[in-house]
């Protein structure tokens, strides 16, 4: 006699019960029968498979909901008479399980992990409140990321419609309403939020993004990235800074000192070389406020010489931003659940925060080495005078 194949522990079967799909599985010695209220069609089979994978995952990771409420598709009416739609986070979990079979592990980590973080932060999960969801996204997520996030929500709900979980897609066409500002060099301006900045810096300072504890200690780069966020300078300008360019003497009439940006590190056939001018000007003076003064004094060694690098590489040479952005920066953003953005966005972030704080665009342009026209065109203009404590 042929032996009967036993169902692996924790697995979920999809069955046809009177023309409707049903999930059957056992957990903690109890047999469960969960009706999905979906007709047995190829497209709804995909939805059932995604929900089955969600249940299996929950069982495996000890987060199973024994009430089954998490896994039900209710077709009832709520107290306001509106249709009781599936919750967005529930649909997203099912969508992610469906996408997991089609995307590489790296794509799931670098892209969908960040979007999942956004879903978890949403104050609204009810699809009857899609306008409130959109407004929160626009207010709390940078434009480039906000647009991409809405695109993913649209894809999620389109999948739900195709799977018979929704009758219509509330996010259809919404991404087109979100406009992305562009910089003069063609790179999208996609600044970090201050919350994202703080998470990035904490991750670097604690070496949290380096669980393998490799020889590349991520905390070494914390001062470099913090400085980029505090000054909005170009990475090549920060790398080329030496202590002779920084005056930290306190003057009641001039604040807490000043930084003179006068050189940058550029690539050449001979490797990294110093260029004795900046990208758009010969030199630039940046005023030091109290937080920046405190920070620079905290990282300056008592034995520091004028020719010493402010932000050296681990081996003492010039910091290689190319290696940093390839080997460290992506791991930091991934660990923080933040969608990948170029390191240059630290500069865009500083400019954006200054304008939000009411600083005149002409002052911001002078500090960062852009033209006022570029600041006005791509960021908008407001007014004040001192570098804010961002």
Image: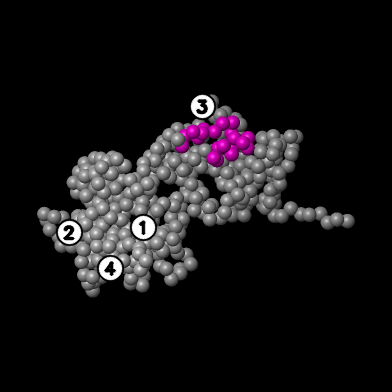
Q: Are marks 3 and 2 in contact (CB under 8 Å)?
A: no
Residue 224 sits in quarter: bottom left
**What residue is pinned by disc 3?**
80
Q: Which of the numbered marks, if any, corresponds to residue 257?
A: 2
Left/right of residue 258 with respect to residue 104 in the rendered view: left
Q: CA distance from mark 3 to mark 4?
A: 65 Å
- For the point 66% across and 45% down, which residue is it? 49
- For the point 36% across and 57% down, which residue is it? 201
Q: Nearer the viewer, mark 1 or mark 3?
A: 1
Relative to residue 185, is residue 256 depicted above or below? below
- For the point 32% across and 58% down, which residue is it? 235
Quadrant of the snapshot with the N terminus: bottom right
* Closer to the camera in the image, 364 or 87: 364
**What residue is pinned by disc 1?**
201
Classify 10 Å Cα crowding around label 3: few (below 14), some (14-19), many (20 and above): few
Q: Are marks 4 and 2 in contact (CB under 8 Å)?
A: no
**What residue is pinned by disc 4?**
309
């Amino acid at each position: 006699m042929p032996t009967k194949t036993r169902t692996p522990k924790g697995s979920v079967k999809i069955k046809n019960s009177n023309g409707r799909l049903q999930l059957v599985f056992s957990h903690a010695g109890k047999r469960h029968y969960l009706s999905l209220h979906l007709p047995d069609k190829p497209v709804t089979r995909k939805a059932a498979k995604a929900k089955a994978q969600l249940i299996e995952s929950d069982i495996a990771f000890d987060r199973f909901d024994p009430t089954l409420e998490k896994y039900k598709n209710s077709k009832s009416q709520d107290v306001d008479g509106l249709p009781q739609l599936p919750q967005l986070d529930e649909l997203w979990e099912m969508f992610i399980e469906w996408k997991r079979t089609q995307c590489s592990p790296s794509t799931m980590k670098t892209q969908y992990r960040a979007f999942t973080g956004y879903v978890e932060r949403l104050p609204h999960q009810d699809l009857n409140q899609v306008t409130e969801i959109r407004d929160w996204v626009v207010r709390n997520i940078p434009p480039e990321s906000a647009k991409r996030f809405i695109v993913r929500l649209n894809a999620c709900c389109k999948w739900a419609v195709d799977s018979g979980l929704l009758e219509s897609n509330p996010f259809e066409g919404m991404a087109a309403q979100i406009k992305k500002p562009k910089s003069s060099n063609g790179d999208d301006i996609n600044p970090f939020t201050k919350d994202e900045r703080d998470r990035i810096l904490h991750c670097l300072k604690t070496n949290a993004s380096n669980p393998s504890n490799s020889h590349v200690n991520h905390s070494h780069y914390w001062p470099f990235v913090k400085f980029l966020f505090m000054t909005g300078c170009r990475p090549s300008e920060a790398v080329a800074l030496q202590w002779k360019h920084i005056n930290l003497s306190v003057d009641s009439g001039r604040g807490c000192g000043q930084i003179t940006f006068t050189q940058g590190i550029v690539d050449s056939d001979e490797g990294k070389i110093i260029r004795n001018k900046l990208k758009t000007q010969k030199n630039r003076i940046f005023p030091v406020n109290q937080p920046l003064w405190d920070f620079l004094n905290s990282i300056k060694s008592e034995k520091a010489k004028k020719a010493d690098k402010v932000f050296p590489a681990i081996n003492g040479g010039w910091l290689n931003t190319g290696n940093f952005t390839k080997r460290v920066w992506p791991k930091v953003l991934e660990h923080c659940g933040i969608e990948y953005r170029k390191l240059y966005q630290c500069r865009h972030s500083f400019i954006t925060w200054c304008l939000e704080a009411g600083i005149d665009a002409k002052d911001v342009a002078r500090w960062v080495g852009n033209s006022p026209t570029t600041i006005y065109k791509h960021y908008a203009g407001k007014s004040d005078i001192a570098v804010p404590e961002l």
